[in-house]
Image (spheres, rainbow, N blue to C red):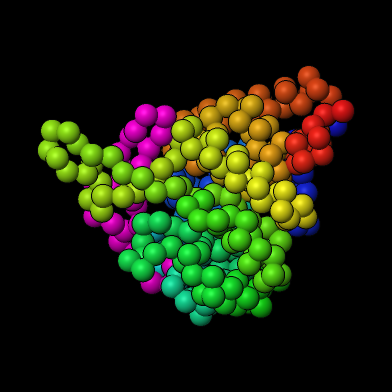
């Protein structure tokens, strides 16, 4: 029995581990340290209509039990991505291409150009380090227009990436009303760190996105809230995973898949051990991973 396997939106994942968008770029560096066949899925760095240089440095600073980043969606733009990078994306795992932009047209055109290379597509509504006017998800009307445009642009399964800085239940309601059946909870939450010697922020843009173990309980709570409100919505829980029991906690809270972000960047060679640890936990219980999904909403184990 393959206890790790799970099917979500008609796509089979060999295990629930999804490499999150961002830390692993387009996979060329990460997969020097492990095989793509080891993980359930790999998500590309977010691709935008035009190339982005990202934010000025310094744009990463470590904090206790985590890190703050202000990368700013650095990427080569969708045309260069589709001509040079997409054809050589890692094989042997589910491929999720993350797309971003400012308008519904930005998103729908990027999806049209990239869908042939993807098994699923992620709609990034939540990057905290790009728009001067705020996170896209903070504008409900714009969010709805983007989601509807994306939904009408492809037959591939779509994932709406939500912002944990905002009300995730209300964001999920907009997703469900737009006909999309899967969400990613959550991108990093906004924070800052200051240098007591210089009196200035460590990051050039002052604020950045917090990720790492300190982030875990926050996102567990948000995953639980979304699953409680929308039992049929598929969820990727993303934030703070560093050990097997973290993954199982996400499943218990309601996540069908679990994203690995900072850990993929700081300890990529540890990911196979993480997956082996999940397998052992399941074997000890004589259960499958999918048996854990949302069990807290059913009163726990009987």
Q: Is residue 107 visible?
A: no
Q: Height in image: 296 above or below 58?
A: above
Give the left or right position of residue 210, taking residue 220 as reference: left
Quadrant where the image shows the N terminus: top right
Does the magenta stretch mainly form a helix, a strand or a loop? Answer: loop
Q: Height in image: 205 above or below 283?
A: below
Give the left or right position of residue 72, taking residue 187 as reference: left
Quadrant where the image shows the C terminus: top right
Q: Position of residue 287 (x, y in %)?
A: 83, 29
Query: In front here: 259 or 252?
Result: 252
Query: In front here: 80 or 171?
Result: 171
- Which residue of the protein is positioned furthest toward the top in this rendering? 284
Give the left or right position of residue 178, taking residue 211 as reference: right
**Which image quarter: residue 244?**
top right
Q: Is residue 192 visible?
A: yes
- Which residue shows up at 60% across the image and 46% down it? 222
Q: Position of residue 86 (x, y in %)?
A: 52, 61
- Which residue shows up at 78% across the image and 37% down it? 295
**Which image quarter: residue 250?**
top right
Q: How many marks?
A: 0
- Which residue of the protein is positioned furthest toward the bottom in this rendering? 105
Please say whether residue 248 is one of the residues in the magenta stretch.
no
- Which residue shows up at 55% across the image and 63% down it? 123
Q: Which residues are magenta?
A: 47-72
**Which image quarter: residue 279?**
top right
Query: In front here: 10 or 204?
Result: 204
């Amino acid at each position: 029995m393959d206890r790790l396997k799970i099917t979500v939106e008609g796509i089979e994942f060999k295990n629930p581990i999804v490499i999150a968008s961002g830390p692993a770029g387009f996979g060329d560096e990460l997969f020097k340290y492990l095989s793509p066949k080891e993980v359930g899925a790999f998500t590309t760095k977010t691709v935008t209509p035009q190339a982005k240089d990202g934010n000025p440095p310094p744009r990463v600073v470590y904090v206790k039990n985590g890190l703050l980043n202000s990368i700013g969606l650095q990427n080569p733009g969708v045309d260069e991505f589709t001509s040079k990078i997409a054809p050589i994306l890692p094989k042997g795992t589910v491929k999720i291409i993350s797309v971003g932009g400012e308008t519904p047209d930005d998103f729908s055109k990027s999806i049209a150009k990239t869908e042939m290379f993807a098994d699923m597509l992620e709609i990034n509504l939540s990057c905290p380090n790009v728009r001067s006017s705020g996170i896209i998800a903070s504008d409900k009307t714009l969010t709805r227009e983007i989601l509807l445009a994306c939904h009408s642009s492809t037959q591939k399964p779509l994932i709406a990436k939500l912002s944990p800085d905002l009300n995730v239940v209300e964001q999920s309601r907009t997703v469900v009303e737009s006909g999309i059946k899967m969400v990613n909870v959550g991108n990093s939450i906004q924070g800052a760190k200051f240098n007591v010697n210089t009196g200035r922020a460590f990051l050039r843009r002052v604020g950045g996105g917090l990720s790492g173990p300190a982030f875990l309980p926050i996102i567990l709570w948000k995953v639980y809230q979304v699953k409680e409100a929308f039992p049929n919505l598929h969820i990727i829980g993303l934030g703070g995973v560093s050990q097997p029991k973290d993954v199982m906690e996400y499943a218990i809270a309601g996540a069908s898949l679990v994203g690995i972000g900072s850990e993929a960047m700081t300890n990529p060679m540890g990911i196979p051990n993480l997956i082996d640890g999940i397998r052992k936990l399941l074997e000890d219980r004589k259960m499958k991973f999918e048996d854990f999904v949302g069990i807290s909403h059913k009163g726990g184990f009987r």
